């Protein structure tokens, strides 16, 4: 895979975004949000990187740390980028039930940080039972809804909204919110 190098980016109109995942939903949602935020195109590539947290993060802090680690490890593994994006989906529970969400963590080549969290939504009891038996949310979705690899498509949010809110759009909105400090550098 040929990535543009930073020295060439000075002459290019398209900065390089590195997403800490090869999941096409995460890559496409980052591209959507960055293009909307900055009204221009970007080179964007996903790389495999560690989150440093369990495969199914639980709770706000663990999920946030997974997103941060993905961004930091992306920068460590590919320092020639201009932005590094970590996206981590997690679960938590309160008195109303188990809910899903994701954290976004973005770094730029000037040391600026942006972060945001998606909205939350509650999971059906059948999926919660599968998760409590040890499954990750994506695997529980696949089994419960008789699907294959749903986490690289619509995910829980797409399935439960009958495609009216896709996982791509769900993440894109939070990525756009995480870009606020980059759009308003005079305030941050």
Image (cartoon, rainbow, N blue to C red):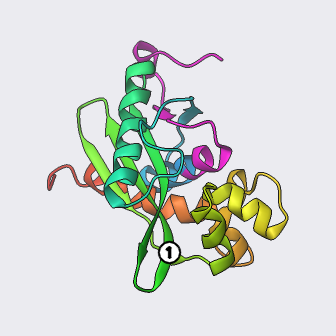
Which image quarter: residue 37? bottom left
The answer to whether residue 62 is left or right of residue 168 is left
Q: Is residue 23 magenta?
A: yes
Q: Is residue 63 magenta?
A: no
Looking at the image, which is closer to me, 76 or 123? 123
Above or below — where is 31 with respect to 78?
below
Residue at 42% from the left image edge and 42% from the top image edge: 53
Highlighted magenta segment, given as a residue range: 1-29
| Secondary element at image label 1 | strand
Position of the N terminus, as image quadrant, is: top right
Considering every residue shown, the one lying at the far left of the view is: 187
Q: Residue 51, position in %: x, y?
A: 45, 38
Which image quarter: residue 45? top right
Looking at the image, which is closer to me, 89 or 183? 89
Above or below — where is 8 with respect to 103?
above
Looking at the image, which is closer to me, 26 or 15? 26
| Number of numbered callouts drawn | 1
The answer to whether residue 153 is left or right of residue 90 is right
Q: Residue 8, position in %: x, y?
A: 46, 15
The answer to whether residue 150 is left or right of residue 186 is right
- Residue 176 visible in the picture: yes
Provide the residue designation for mark 1: 98
Q: Residue 2, position in %: x, y?
A: 62, 16
Considering every residue shown, the one lying at the far front of the view is: 133
Considering every residue shown, the one lying at the far bottom of the view is: 96
Residue at 80% from the left image edge and 69% from the top image edge: 145
- Residue 166 visible in the picture: no
**Label 1 environment density (alpha carbons within 10 Å; few <14, some 14–19, many ≥20):** some
Q: Residue 152, position in %: x, y?
A: 70, 50
């Amino acid at each position: 895979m040929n990535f543009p190098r930073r020295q060439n980016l000075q002459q290019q109109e398209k900065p390089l975004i590195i997403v800490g995942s090869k999941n096409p939903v995460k890559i496409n949602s980052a591209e959507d949000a960055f293009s909307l935020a900055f009204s221009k195109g970007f080179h964007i590539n996903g790389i495999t990187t560690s989150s440093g947290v369990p495969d199914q993060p639980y709770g706000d802090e663990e999920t946030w740390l997974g997103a941060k680690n993905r961004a930091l490890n992306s920068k460590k593994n590919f320092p020639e980028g201009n932005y590094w994006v970590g996206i981590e989906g997690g679960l938590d529970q309160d008195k109303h039930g188990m809910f899903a969400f994701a954290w976004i963590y973005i770094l730029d080549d000037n040391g600026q940080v942006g972060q945001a969290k998606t909205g939350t939504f509650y999971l059906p009891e059948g999926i919660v039972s599968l998760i409590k038996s040890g499954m990750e949310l994506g695997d529980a979705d696949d089994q419960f809804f008789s699907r294959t690899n749903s986490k690289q498509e619509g995910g829980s949010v797409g399935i439960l909204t009958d495609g009216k809110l896709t996982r791509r759009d769900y993440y894109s909105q939070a990525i756009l919110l995480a870009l606020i400090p980059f759009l308003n550098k005079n305030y941050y």
